[in-house]
Amino acid sequence: MAKKMRLDKLLGHMGCGSRSEIKKWAKGGLIVVNGRVVKDSGLQVDPEHDEILLDGERIQYREHIYVMMHKPQGVISATEDLREQTVVDLLPEDIRHFEPFPVGRLDKDTEGLLLLTNDGKLAHELLSPKRHVPKTYFSIVEGEVSDDDVEAFRDGVTLDDGYETQPAALTILRHEQEEHRIYSHIELTITEGKFHQVKRMFEAVGKRVTYLKRLSMGTLMLDAALPLGQWRECSEDEIDQLRQGKSIEK
Ligand code: URA
C-alpha cells in the first residue's frame, strides 16, 4: 500500500506555497483531488496515485531531486555560508526547496562534476569508504609527471599526515613547456575521498596541482554539453546506474 501524507505537506514539499497559503487556497476551492474539490488541506492523500490539481495545474509529487552541476571555481561545496557563495546558491528556488546538498566536496578552486541531492541514502552509499566509488579527475600539474609517479600512485603514496593512499590510476596525457616550466596534463582515478586528496597525492611526489576538474563519480559523468556554472537534473537512467554501480551506455 502506498504511504499517505497530508495534502498541505505534499504541496509544500513541491514548493507550491506555505501551509497557510495552501489552507487558504483549499478554502477557496482551488484544490481538486481525484476530481473533487477538497476544502480541508490536512486531508490524507496518496502521493503516488491520487490526481492533485492546484488551480487547474496537475501537481506531480516526487520525493527526491538529483542535480548534476558543473561546479565553477570560487563557490564552496556547502548548503549555506555567511560569507561565501555556495553551490546551492547557484540553484533556483524551485530546486532549492527540495533541500539538496552536495554529495561530497570539491575544493573552492576545483571545477567539475558535483551531484546535489536530498536522497540521503544514495549520498551515504556513494560516500561510504566501503563502496570504493571511483572518482576521475583531470588536472594540470606543475612539474614533469613521470612513469615513476604512475607506479607510485598505483602502489599508494604517503600523505603529509602519514596516511597511505589506496591504489590510484594515473594517466599522463601530455607535457607542456611554459617559460622554462614543465606542466603535465593528467587524469587520475581514486577510490577514496580524503581531504584535498589529489593535491596532497601530488605533493607527496614533489609536484603541485595548478588546475583540478572532476570528470566523473561512479558511473555519473560530467555532461560535456553542460557549461561551467550550469546544472541540470540527472536522468532516471543516470541515477539508476549510479545506484547499481553499473556504467551507462551513451
Ligand atoms: N582532491 C582535491 O585535492 N581537491 C578536490 O577538490 C577534490 C579532490
Image (tube, grey):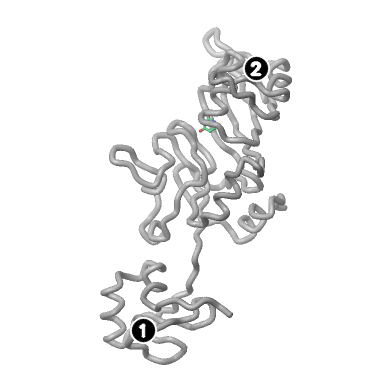
Residue displayed at 39% across by 56% down: 96
Label 1, label 2: how many angstroms apart (C-alpha)? Answer: 64 Å
Q: Where is residue 9 in the image (x, y as percent from the top left)?
A: 38, 72
Q: Which amino acid type corresponds to the residue marked 2 in the rendered image? A: Val
Q: Which amino acid type corresponds to the residue marked 1 in the rendered image? A: Ile
Q: In this view, does 249 lie above or below 159?
A: below
- Residue on which the image places disc 2: 145
Residue displayed at 57% across by 54% down: 122
Q: Is residue 27 above or below residue 180?
A: below
Q: In this view, does 126 lie above or below 99?
A: above
- Residue on which the image places disc 1: 31
Labelled disc at residue 20 = none
Q: Where is residue 43 in the image (x, y as percent from the top left)?
A: 39, 83
Residue displayed at 37% across by 67% down: 15
Q: Position of residue 244 (x, y in %)?
A: 69, 54
> Split into 4 quadrants, where in the image is the N terminus?
bottom right
Between 116 and 111, the one lying in front of the other is 116
Residue displayed at 72% across by 23% down: 155
Q: Can residue 250 be seen in this snapshot?
A: no
